Amino acid sequence: TSGASSTMKVTTSTSTAPGTYPITITAKGTATHTAQYTLTVGGSGPGTGAPDIDVAKVRAHLTEFQSIASRNGGNRRSTSQGYRDSVAYVKGKLQAAGYTVTEQPCTSGCTSGAGPNLIAEWPKGDAANTYMFGAHLDSVGAGPGINDNASGSAALLETALALAEKNPNMKNRVRFGWWTDEEQGLN
């Protein structure tokens, strides 16, 4: 009826895949009216929670860090090929997920020859509200660093990948960092 209003409630189930869905509403009365709307599922709207992090996927990253160390003399020290291979592994995963990834030289008194820090930023969300999370990626020279930094780096990597997959339209920007040379003196 002209001048009247109606309320419509749209709900989805927990199995609804994230994405954008068009909705067309057609009202028929003395005249026909059509309106177009968009429903976003899994976006950054109210009620969108943090994704669950799959422990099996974290373990898979941890296993890869151990394999990298094993192929490179048993460690992933910041000056070693093991560290550079760790950087390449993390960087490849993040780029494939859609992150903007940069390698940043260490400028805080790092050991000569230390590999780069790795910075990954999600290209969406409000850049004025950026949340940053980090872990150190290098190991001690005496071992692979699996119980210390690799566990943190693996968990951080899987968190970044889960956010990209489950909530790509985050309201705010996120940035992740993996640091070099921490084991050589808190650089």
Image (tube, helix red, strand yellow):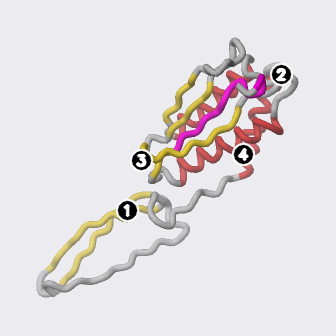
In the displayed structure, does residue 31 sit left or right of residue 61?
A: left
Measured in 3D between alpha carbons, the distance from the residue under mark 3 to the one under mark 4, in whole angstroms, is: 28 Å
Q: In this view, does 43 lie above or below 63?
A: below
Q: What residue type is labelled 2?
A: Gly
Measured in 3D between alpha carbons, the distance from the residue under mark 3 to the one under mark 2, in whole angstroms, is: 40 Å
Disc nearer the start of the sequence (2/4): 4
Q: Which amino acid does label 3 sit on?
A: Asp
Q: Are marks 2 and 4 in contact (CB under 8 Å)?
A: no
- SS at mark 3? strand
Name the disc covering residue 133, or none.
none
Q: Do the residues labelled 1 and 2 touch (CB within 8 Å)?
A: no
Q: In this view, does 11 lie above or below 179?
A: below
Q: Which of marks 3 and 1 is in front?
A: 3
Disc nearer the start of the sequence (4/1): 1
Q: Which of marks 4 and 1 is in front?
A: 4
Name the disc covering residue 21, or none.
1
Decide whether residue 38 is among the magenta residues.
no
Region in magenta: 174-185
Disc nearer the start of the sequence (3/1): 1
- The picture quadrant where one finds residue 70 is top right
- Disc 2 crowd rating (10 Å Cα; few below 14, some 14-19, many 20+) is some
Q: Are marks 3 and 2 in contact (CB under 8 Å)?
A: no
Q: Residue at x 57, y 42 (%)?
A: 132
Name the disc covering residue 58, or none.
4
Q: Name the residue under label 3.
A: 126
> Where is residue 111 drawn, in percent x and y?
72, 16
Q: Nearer the viewer, mark 2 or mark 4?
A: 2
Q: Are marks 3 and 4 in contact (CB under 8 Å)?
A: no
- Disc 4 crowd rating (10 Å Cα; few below 14, some 14-19, many 20+) is many
- Disc 1 crowd rating (10 Å Cα; few below 14, some 14-19, many 20+) is few
